[in-house]
Image: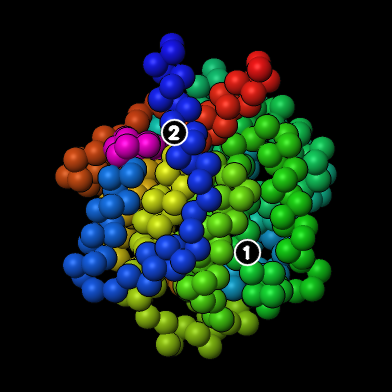
C-alpha cells in the first residue's frame, strides 16, 4: 500500500504542474510529416503510461434533434426550418440500450438537442432508470443534454447517470459570443459545468477546432481551460461547416486535410498536457478521413462512441456536413471496429465502464487530504 501511495503521489505531483502555454503553442504549431509523427508518437507514449492501450466504447443514442438553442454553427439549430424533427420513443431507446449491452459495450451515451421542459426532463429520468433496470446496473450512462438547472442535473445523477459531457466549444468569450445568439451566454455555460461537477458527475467538455476567427493561441488557452477546470474527459473535434447555418459561406472553402491535421494535433497536445483524462476520438474525424477515428487513437485518444441509433433517424442528426455511417448498422460497425483496433495493437474494453482515471485520482487525493 505504501508503494502504491508513493506512485500515486508522484502521478498527482506530475499532473499538478500547469502546462506551459508557449509549449502548447509550439506543439499545436507542428508542421511536416516527420515532425507530426514525432508529436503523435510522444502523445501515444503518454497515453500508454497513464491510461493504457485499452479502447473504451460508448454506444451512442442520438435521442432527439429537437433543440431550443440556435448556435450559428450547428445543423440541428432551432433556426434550421428545413430539418425534420424527431424524438425516439422510450421503447425504441430501451431496445437500443439492450443492443448496446448485447454487444458488450460497457457504457451508453444519451445525446440530444438542448431542452428544459418538464416532460423532457422526466422522460430522461425514466429512461436512465429503465436502462439501469434493464442492465441490472451494468451499463454506465453518460449524458450530453446541455444546460440545465442544478436540480435537474441532480435528478439525473440520482437516477443513475454518472458522466456528463457539456462542450464549451471555445474558452474565448468573445469568440463564443460571435458564434451564439445574445441569449446564450458563456457565463451560463461555464456555470453549468460547475454545477455538473458539484453533483458528482465525471465532467466532460470540449471545443471545436478550426472555428472561424480561432487562433493557435485560443486552442492553447482551451487546453489551459481544461486543466484549470480539472475536467475528466474530452469530446472535441474539427469544426466542419453546415450549409443550413449562418456560417454556410465557409462550406466551399473548407479544407478537410487541414481540419483533420489540426484535430489530431489538438488530441496529441491534450494528451501530453493532461495525461490521465479520457479523450474521445470523435465521429467528425471519421467524416474527414476513412480512418479518422483510428488516427485519433494513435494521436492519444482512448474512447470511441459507436452510433447505435436506429439508421432511420441518423440523417436527422447531422450537426455538420458529411457525417459518416448514416446507413451502417451497429453490428456492421462493430465487426469492422474490432479488426481496426486489433490492427493498431490495442484491445477493446468490453463490458467495462472505462471511467476516467483522472476522476479517481482526484477522488483519492481528496480522501488523502481529508484524512490528514
Q: Closest to the observer: 140 or 93?
A: 140
Side (left or right) of 85 relative to 330: right
Give the residue drawn at x 33%, y 44%. 46
- Residue 153, relative to residue 247: is it above or below? above
Give the residue drawn at x 48%, y 73%. 216
Farthest residue toward the top? 1
Crowd band around label 2 with a 10 angstrom C-alpha radius: few (<14), some (14–19), many (20+): some
Q: Is there CB contact under 8 Å for labels 1 and 2?
A: no
Q: Nearer the viewer, mark 1 or mark 2?
A: 2
Q: Secondary structure at mark 2?
A: helix
- Residue 2, relative to residue 35: is it above or below? above
Q: Position of residue 20 (x, y in %)?
A: 48, 58
Q: Position of residue 290 (x, y in %)?
A: 27, 62
Q: Secondary structure at mark 1?
A: loop
Give the residue drawn at x 63%, y 64%. 171
Q: Quadrant of residue 338?
A: top left
Q: Which mark is residue 171?
A: 1
- Residue 25, relative to residue 365: is it above or below? below
Q: Which mark is residue 235?
A: none
Q: Quadrant of residue 254?
A: bottom left
Q: Closest to the observer: 172 or 307?
A: 172
Q: Which residues are magenta?
A: 48-60
Residue 136 visible in this rendered orientation of the protein: yes
Side (left or right) of 4 relative to 121: left
Q: Position of residue 362 (x, y in %)?
A: 57, 32
Side (left or right) of 305 relative to 144: left
Give the residue drawn at x 45%, y 40%. 14
Q: Which mark is residue 11?
A: 2
Is residue 52 within the magenta segment?
Answer: yes
The N terminus lies in quadrant = top left
Amino acid at each position: 500500500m505504501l508503494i502504491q501511495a508513493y506512485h500515486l503521489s508522484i502521478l498527482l505531483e506530475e499532473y499538478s504542474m500547469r502546462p506551459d502555454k508557449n509549449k502548447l503553442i509550439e506543439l499545436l504549431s507542428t508542421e511536416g510529416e516527420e515532425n507530426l509523427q514525432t508529436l503523435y508518437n510522444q502523445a501515444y507514449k503518454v497515453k500508454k503510461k497513464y491510461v493504457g492501450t485499452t479502447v473504451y466504447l460508448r454506444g451512442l443514442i442520438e435521442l432527439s434533434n429537437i433543440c431550443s438553442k440556435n448556435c450559428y454553427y450547428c445543423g440541428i439549430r432551432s433556426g434550421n426550418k428545413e430539418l425534420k424533427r424527431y424524438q425516439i420513443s422510450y421503447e425504441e431507446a430501451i431496445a437500443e440500450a439492450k443492443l448496446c449491452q448485447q454487444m458488450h459495450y460497457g457504457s451508453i451515451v444519451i445525446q440530444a438537442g438542448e431542452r428544459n421542459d418538464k416532460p423532457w426532463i422526466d422522460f430522461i429520468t425514466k429512461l436512465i432508470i429503465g436502462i439501469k433496470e434493464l442492465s441490472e446496473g451494468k451499463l454506465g450512462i453518460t449524458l450530453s443534454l446541455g444546460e440545465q438547472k442544478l436540480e435537474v442535473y441532480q435528478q439525473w445523477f440520482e437516477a443513475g447517470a454518472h458522466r456528463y459531457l457539456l462542450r464549451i466549444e471555445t474558452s474565448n468569450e468573445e469568440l463564443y459570443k460571435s458564434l451564439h445568439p445574445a441569449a446564450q451566454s458563456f457565463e451560463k455555460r461555464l456555470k453549468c459545468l460547475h454545477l455538473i461537477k458539484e453533483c458528482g458527475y465525471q465532467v466532460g467538455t470540449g471545443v471545436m477546432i478550426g472555428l472561424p476567427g480561432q487562433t493557435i493561441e485560443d486552442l492553447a488557452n482551451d487546453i489551459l481551460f481544461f486543466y484549470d477546470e480539472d475536467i475528466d474527459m474530452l469530446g472535441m473535434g474539427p469544426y466542419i461547416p453546415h450549409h443550413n447555418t449562418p456560417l454556410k459561406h465557409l462550406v466551399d472553402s473548407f479544407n478537410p486535410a487541414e481540419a483533420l491535421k489540426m484535430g489530431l494535433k489538438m488530441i496529441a497536445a491534450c494528451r501530453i498536457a493532461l495525461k490521465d483524462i479520457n479523450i474521445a476520438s470523435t465521429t467528425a474525424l471519421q467524416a474527414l478521413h476513412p480512418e479518422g477515428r483510428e488516427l485519433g487513437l494513435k494521436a492519444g485518444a482512448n474512447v470511441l462512441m459507436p452510433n447505435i441509433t436506429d439508421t432511420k433517424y441518423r440523417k436527422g442528426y447531422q450537426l455538420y456536413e458529411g457525417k459518416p455511417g448514416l446507413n451502417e448498422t451497429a453490428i456492421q460497425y462493430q465487426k469492422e471496429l474490432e479488426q481496426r483496433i486489433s490492427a493498431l495493437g490495442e484491445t477493446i474494453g468490453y463490458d467495462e465502464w472505462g471511467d476516467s482515471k483522472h476522476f479517481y485520482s482526484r477522488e483519492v487525493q481528496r480522501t488523502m487530504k481529508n484524512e490528514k
